[in-house]
């Protein structure tokens, strides 16, 4: 009887916990980052041609501004510690995320990854690359990748700034990886827009970073940080104008 009672209580607690999780409210946050000023023209990188793979002329991606002023590759993430995570994210919590050396460029340019996920560093080119990653307080790696090969890596410590990734063989190659404990990181698209899905409906602190500007430091966002009360459903930051002066550091 005692064991039956314990089992019944444990079952009831489990049901309550599940019900509480299902009853939690979640909201999406959207917005668009735009360049406040005259947008700079794209700049082609100086690339030493390698007949095996480095024949494509890529643009400098440190500041990418679209025709309508949208800024690509702006990173926004939740700084709040121990933030509740929506059940929808459980499906890919252990996924492998690909970070590719492709046509002598890192693809994607900026990769957010959870600590529970595995980094799959690939080389899709017909020439050798090395992927040099030195995270703060975590294991560094700088392994030569033969053509059409890959390696796996697991981060153990989250970072507050995206980790710069370089190829010492092809020094114009630059990318970034941002390991975080939770899945709430977004990178703005070509038009400057972003979406953070299924955030907990509570006050959260956010961080905004851009490769050339660093933390997007404005009077409203000191050191690129701001707090916002997320409500259930849709939340919109609207159009966020980033002053041109921030990109001249």
Image (cartoon, rainbow, N blue to C red):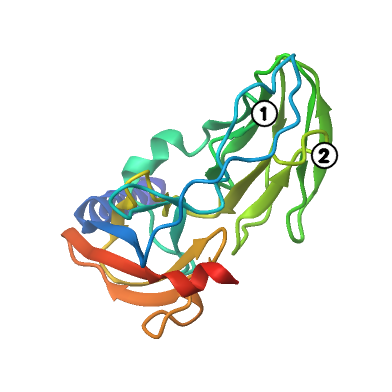
Q: Along the line of sight, which residue is nearer the eye, 83 or 216?
A: 216
Give the mark, 1 or 2, whose residue is nearer the N terminus.
1
Q: Is residue 61 above or below residue 56?
A: below
Callout 2: few (<14), some (14-19), or many (20+) C-alpha neighbours within 10 Å?
A: some
Q: What is the x, y in percent for residue 184?
A: 41, 54
Q: Which mark is residue 129?
A: none
Q: What is the x, y in percent for residue 170?
A: 77, 34
In the displayed structure, does residue 160 sit left or right of residue 166? left
Q: How far apart are labels 1 and 2 at the CA level?
A: 12 Å
Q: Along the line of sight, which residue is nearer the eye, 83 or 61?
A: 61
Callout 1: few (<14), some (14-19), or many (20+) C-alpha neighbours within 10 Å?
A: many
Residue at 70%, 34% in the rendered image: 47
Q: Quadrant of residue 109?
A: top right
Residue at 23%, 50% in the rendered image: 22
Residue annotated with mark 2? 168
Helix, strand or loop for disc 2: loop
Say if residue 198 shows up in the picture. yes
Give the residue at the far bottom of this rendering. Answer: 219
Q: What is the x, y in percent for residue 152?
A: 70, 30
Residue at 74%, 14% in the rendered image: 52
Helix, strand or loop for disc 1: loop
Residue annotated with mark 1? 104
Q: Is residue 93 above or below residue 35?
A: above
Q: What is the x, y in percent for residue 167?
A: 76, 38
Q: Quadrant of residue 76?
A: bottom left
């Amino acid at each position: 009887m005692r064991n039956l009672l314990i089992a019944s209580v444990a079952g009831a607690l489990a049901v309550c916990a599940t019900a509480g999780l299902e009853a939690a409210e979640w909201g999406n946050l959207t917005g668009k980052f735009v360049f406040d000023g005259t947008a700079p023209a794209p700049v082609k990188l100086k690339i030493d041609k390698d007949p095996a793979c480095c024949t494509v002329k890529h643009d400098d991606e440190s500041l990418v501004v679209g025709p309508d002023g949208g800024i690509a590759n702006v990173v926004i993430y939740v700084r709040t510690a121990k933030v509740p995570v929506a059940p929808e994210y459980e499906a890919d919590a252990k996924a492998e995320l690909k970070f590719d050396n492709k046509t002598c460029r890192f693809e994607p340019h900026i990769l957010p990854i959870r600590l529970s996920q595995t980094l799959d560093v690939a080389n899709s080119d017909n020439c050798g690359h090395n992927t040099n990653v030195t995270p703060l307080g975590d294991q560094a790696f700088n392994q030569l990748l033969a053509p059409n090969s890959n390696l796996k890596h697991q981060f153990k410590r989250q970072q507050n700034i995206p980790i710069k990734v370089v190829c010492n063989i092809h020094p114009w190659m630059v990318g970034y990886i941002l390991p975080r404990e939770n899945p709430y990181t977004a990178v703005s698209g070509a038009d400057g827009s972003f979406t953070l899905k299924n955030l907990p409906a509570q006050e959260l602190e956010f961080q905004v970073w851009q490769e050339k500007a660093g933390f997007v430091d404005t009077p409203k966002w000191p050191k690129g940080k701001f707090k916002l009360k997320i409500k259930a459903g849709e939340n919109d930051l609207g159009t966020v104008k980033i002053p041109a002066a921030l990109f001249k550091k």
